[in-house]
Image (cartoon, helix red, strand yellow):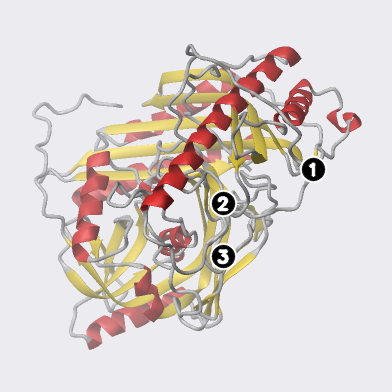
Amino acid sequence: MTRRILLLRGGKAAGAVLLISRTGFAQDIVFTLAQIDGDPVLKAMRDEMDRSRKLRIAGGEDAPYFISYDFTDSEDFHTTATLGSTLTTSHEHERTPSAQVRVGSYQFDNTGHVFSGRYSGSRYDGDWPLDDNYEALREGFWLLTDRTFKAAMESIGRKRASLKNAAAQSGEQIADFSHADAVVSLPKVAHKKIDDVALTQRFAKLSGVFTAYPEVLSSSVEYQLIDGITYLLNSEGTAIRYADRLNWMVARAEGQADDGMMIHDAISVQTLDPDKLPPDAELRPQISGIGENVRDLLKAPKGEEYIGPVLFEPAAAAQLMAQLVGDNLHVPRKPLSDPGGRGGNIIPSEFETRIGARVLPEWMDVTDDPSQTSWNGKPLAGYYQFDLEGVPPKPVAVIEKGILKSFLMTRQPVKGFAASNGHARLLGSYGAYSAAIGNLVVNASQSMPLADLKKRAAQMAMDRGKAYAMLVRKLNFPFAGTVSELQSLAQASQQSGGSAWPLSPPVLIYRLYPDGREELVRGLRFRGVSSRSLRDLEAASAETALFDFINNSAPLAMIGQGGYVAGTAVVSPGILFEELELEQPQEQLQKRPIVPPPPTA
């Protein structure tokens, strides 16, 4: 399933439209007029696709071998409130189309260059009609195809020029695109009715929960609903239409300790069905929990630097696995560039060269299965029918007995993996989509009750001559801090030799004493932790937890960022590390406000 927000659309500009045709594809669009069932959007896509399949620039050597249209008609509602008062509210009807035109062949096409997708000419496509006017829709797809085709021609020209200027290529030449079976799925879909007034009042009242916590200096409750109908049609014969829905509530709170340290906490609650968001009786305690966490953290002592056993409770372990495993299961290809020129700005996977190697203990397995709808009776936010390329997702056993076996794949091949398994979930770069997890499940064949695991962690610490072990209950993931705090984390991660992406710091971390006592501390972050740290896990808990979140293309899935979003779920047991390192950030802290805040009660 696809989710789109914050997409930018350009305006019209002067210039000539050039669509010169000849017979191109051998395969016809496979769905019939009966399957269109009077849908003008689908009919416009089909008719313009038939015409666009014959595109060719006069005298040029490249003709399109693949064309895809993607169109989402969505009713989007958004409201933000604080302390019982609504700050913003909006209800928008949006239509967000996109197109792919690939010229050349599956083996070599216009993608994968550092300038792929850039277009230097005039642009006519821009605003789209909100009604179902067939002629206006046809014109929109025509102009969109025109610009995308021209950009593809420019891109493949640049790519060939870069290859001419480069030294002879050695090794295996990987194809630029893979074949996929055509899928036809066109059920009737309608928008749900959105009650703006009731939703605005509901989340304004929920934001009033924070009035009971005067220690909280800043707080908000934000709700967003995307009720979309998505169409995807391509020249291989795929034609799909499906409900594309996601709604979520984010509650955030912030405070400042006496020494100036900023304290953040947040929760994100999401469902695929707008009618299945938990009732207020369940949401209020979760929002209150944020206020209580901030209040308790402000009173907690600063943590000390530490090297030793660290235990992650199941929910925190799921947050950790989403980062150290989930973010490394896709392998972005480095784009081609001119010799000595600017290279592609990609972050490589830490697993890229690890196929067949042990990345977890031999008693652990990991599977990603977006086809599953529930776990222990709870709905899974990572379920979807089709990915962004129209490919149905397949369950993938990515790690078996600790050995890395596979990656999550889009239709862009990587070394050793030629076909998609339906995981194109986020917008990528250089003409490709990015793979991402759906429902990631971590299993441990060897485990013990969490209570016993805590005792083991404390005993390990005593054996090392330490007074306590460390217990992590919650990480700051998705990240609820500021951009500057995220940049500081990234710099610290690079300097310490940790993960290429920064690792989210703990929100709730405790000193775990041998007598079972837990003491909350604040202000710590991990040092030198990467996916390689997972190979030597000491043990796992019998208890497991489900953690779901809104994934996006931002580091640490930072809340409120990213243009494409995807519901995601991770199931994990608690995990015990024999040794991790924690440190205090060495940063200047802001002074507290001179004038105290007004009373909120």
The residue lying furthest to the front in this view is 59
Of marks 3 and 2, the one in the foreground = 2
Q: How far apart in space, not on screen, are marks 3 and 2 (Cα)?
A: 36 Å
The residue lying furthest to the right in this view is 34
Residue 513 placed where, x, y %? 26, 74
Which residue type does callout 1 highlight? Answer: Ala
SS type, badge 1: loop
- Taking the image as drawn, is residue 335 in sight? no
- Residue 216 vs residue 47, the one in the foreground: 47
Which residue type does callout 2 highlight? Answer: Phe
- Taking the image as drawn, is residue 476 in sight? yes
Q: How far apart in space, not on screen, are marks 1 and 3 (Cα)?
A: 42 Å
SS type, badge 2: loop
Read off the residue under disc 2.
108
Left or right: 412 with respect to 315? right
SS type, badge 3: strand
Rendered residue at 31%/27% (across/down): 601
Mark linked to residue 441: 3
